[in-house]
Amino acid sequence: MITLASGGLSGGEVAGLIVAVFWAVLVCFMAYVLVKLGKVVGDTSKLVTGVADQTVPLLGEVTSSVVHVNVELERVDAITANVQTITSNVSALTAVFAATLGSPVIKVAAFSYGVRRALSDRHEHDVRKRVKADLKAEKSARKASRKAGK
C-alpha cells in the first residue's frame, strides 16, 4: 500500500508501480496487435472467398471450352480423313488416265512432231534450191551483161 503520511514511496512500491505500468502498456500493445491481426485475417478470408467465387465459374467456362474444342477437333479429324480419301481417289484416277490415254496421246504427239519436222525440212530444202537457182541466174545475167558491154 502507498502511504502518504510517510512522504514517499518505498523502493518496492516504485518497482511494483513500474512493473504495473509496463504490464498495462504491454497488454494495450498486445490488444492493438490482436485487433490488427483480426482485421488481416478478416481481409484474407474475404480475399479467399472472392477468389473461390470467381474461380468456380471460370473453371466451368474452361471445361465447356475444352468440350467445344474437342468437338471441333473431331470435325477436323473427319475432314482430314475425307481429304485423304479424295487424294487417294485422285491419285488412282490419274494413274488410270495415264495408263489408258497417256500412251496413245504420247504416240500421236510424237507422230505429229515427226510429220511437222519432215515437212519443215522439205520446205527448207525447196527454199535453198530456189535461192541457189536465183543466185546462179543473177550471176549468169551479170556475165552476159559484161560480155555485151565489151
Image (cartoon, helix red, strand yellow):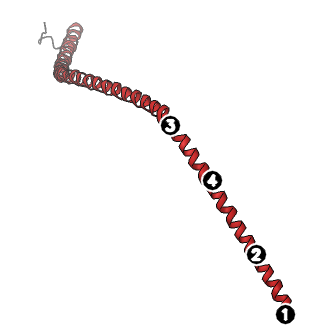
Q: Secondary structure at mark 3?
A: helix
Between disc 2 and disc 1, whose residue precedes?
2
Which of the 4 image quadrants contains residue 125?
Answer: bottom right
Of tags 3 and 4, the one toward the viewer is 4
Residue 73: horizontal and vertical position, in percent? 30, 24
Residue type, mark 1 in image: Gly
The disc, 3 or 4, on the residue closer to the chain's N-terminal end is 3
The residue drawn where x is 80% and y is 79% is 139
Give residue 107's quadrant in the image. top right
Name the residue type under label 2.
Leu
Q: Is residue 105 left or right of residue 2?
A: right
Name the residue carrying label 4: 117
Circle nearer the N terminus (1, 4): 4
Q: Secondary structure at mark 1?
A: helix
For marks 2 and 3 on the same chain, the one whose residue lies earlier in the sequence: 3
Q: Secondary structure at mark 2?
A: helix
Which residue matches tag 2?
Answer: 135
x, y percent for residue 146: 84, 88
Name the residue carrying label 1: 149
Q: Nearer the viewer, mark 2 or mark 3?
A: 2
Mark number for residue 102?
3
Instruction: Work out whether mark 4 precedes mark 2 in sequence or the reverse, and give the earlier one.
Output: 4
Name the quarter where the N terminus is drawn.
Answer: top left
The residue nearer to you, when weighing 112 against 13, is: 112
User: Nearest the camera: 27 or 38?
Assistant: 38
